[in-house]
Amino acid sequence: MSFLLTEPQCSTWYSAFYESSLNRLAQNVCTAQDPITVCLRSEADLRSDSSGVKTWIELSRQGKATAGGPGWICTGLDLLCQEMDKKFPLPLDFELSAAHLFFWHKLERCNYFLWTVADLLMRCEPLDGHCFRNLLKNPVPDGGNWQMFVNLVKKYGVMPKKCYLPSTQRTTKMNVILRSKLREYACMLHAQFTFNGNGCHLPDLIQEMIPHLFKVICICLGEPPKVFTWSFYDNKKRYQCLNDLTAVHFYEAMIGCKVNLDAFVCLGHDPRISSSYHSNYQVTNSSNMMGGKPHRYNNQSMDVIMQIMVNSLEGDKHVWMACDIRRAFSSKSGAFSLRSHQFDLLFGFKVGESLTKAERLDYRASRRDSALLLTSVGLDTLKQPVQFRFINASTMGESSATGCPTEQDMNERDTEALKKKSVKPADNKLDAEWLREYAFEIVVHEKFVPPGVLHAARIPKWKELPAWDPMGALLN
């Protein structure tokens, strides 16, 4: 059965379109302006839409969002900054280096890709199969997940941002080179496997490939220092200088002694019929290093997740959250809200409201793509969450998922910040209704998780999800 467009049909639609003066007005406006922006409700209208917030629960410590790397790394570092020893007199502008973890993520991801190719070859996966196609689509992505962040921090530690200023070379061009070499190396591994009929020589071949990839990353980014000196003026304007530090020692002394990353629990919300609540799920090939943790989560209802988030924020602990920002019709000013746009006034029908959350996942209309750090919650008179506040550099234009800022960029940004010192920073909010529809995963401390949920999350059994499942999408 087919439906061919004919000239009489198009003529009928054309005539009907121009019979309406509103269609002519909408056409004139949208040919000159962004149609999504045109549908945005006015600021006055948005303010008049009462959020119902009665009481805000603010955390005792906040700060500016980490910048200079992919959002999932920056948000993870924001969480670590909040967990640092509060007795230590940190500088007011203190940030951890996202570029440091990004460097090692790139190297580890290259190694992980080559060994994954070898594993697929050993399992006789066809080269034109879904597994190989998905892996070769982007061999060394910038994106990641919470488990990747934990893998990096545990192995390589953290360091202050000022102790590792990345090279002037943007990572976009480096990624082009790495992708080219990795696909070339994948071809070589396949040829070697085909020639020998087994994978006995693949490990030796991979060991010869890795140094070349390390060389590319070092040339483009500059290698992070193994030992560094951290000098700064603390929050009382006293000069401090710490010598002979390593990233691992810095992490253990400043953060590791206060927080155990293994004590955090990853909970997801996947309402699709194919997924069941209280079950654990693992995404195939979702790590960034050999021997590292893959992406795993325990699936829970949104009501359970909401209450856990409120418990954590009431307990003075931040919540790491993975959500869909890029595909949501969000407001540039005001909160992320389901009511921020009125498409029916422009087009005569609603947009983005017909599909349920499960249907958006099934039809690839939504997926997790960004990480936020929730810092406070607004409760109504019934103690139900109405709005949340968050910090995230990428939503404020301070972070890049494709490159790391140079020292010159940082100086220019500091100059602009001084010029705008009197301007009040944006208040990043999101409605609880929006969060229910576009949040897919949270990471919280285990002490805020109910015993039954925690027990289910700790069971060492999980269902496998393919690498291309939307719940396994990498965060930028």
Image: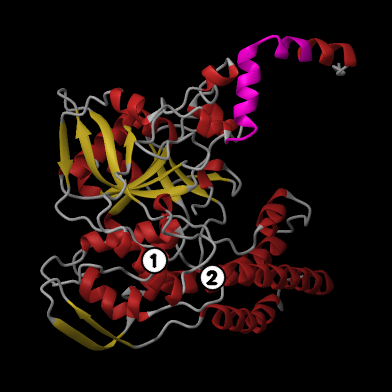
Residue lying at 56% horizontally and 52% vertically, measured from the top left? 284
Disc 2 or disc 1, which is closer to the eye? 1
Q: Earlier in the sequence, mark 2 or mark 1?
A: 2
What mark, if any, has residue 87 been given in the picture? none
Residue type at the position of mark 1:
Arg
Query: Considering depth in this image, is 449 or 214 the residue closer to the camera?
Result: 214
SS of the residue at dot 1?
helix
Magenta-span inclusion, residue 29 = yes
Q: Position of residue 44 (x, y in %)?
A: 33, 27
Q: Position of residue 28 (x, y in %)?
A: 64, 26
According to the image, label 2 marks what residue?
106
Disc 1 residue crowd, few under 14, some 14–19, many 20+, Cα 10 Å? some
Residue type at the position of mark 2:
Lys
**Magenta stretch prevailing secondary structure:** helix
Query: Considering depth in this image, is 58 or 36 the residue closer to the camera?
Result: 36
Magenta-span inclusion, residue 364 = no
Tell me how the rendering is colored. Answer: secondary structure
In the displayed structure, does residue 10 sit left or right of residue 144?
right
Q: CA distance from mark 2 to mark 1?
A: 26 Å
Can residue 258 be seen here? The reply is: yes
Disc 2 residue crowd, few under 14, some 14–19, many 20+, Cα 10 Å? many
Q: Position of residue 384 (x, y in %)?
A: 21, 27
According to the image, label 1 marks what residue?
413
Q: Which residues are magenta?
A: 14-33
Q: Quadrant of residue 140?
A: bottom right
Residue lying at 32% horizontally and 58% vertically, measured from the top left? 65
SS of the residue at dot 2?
helix
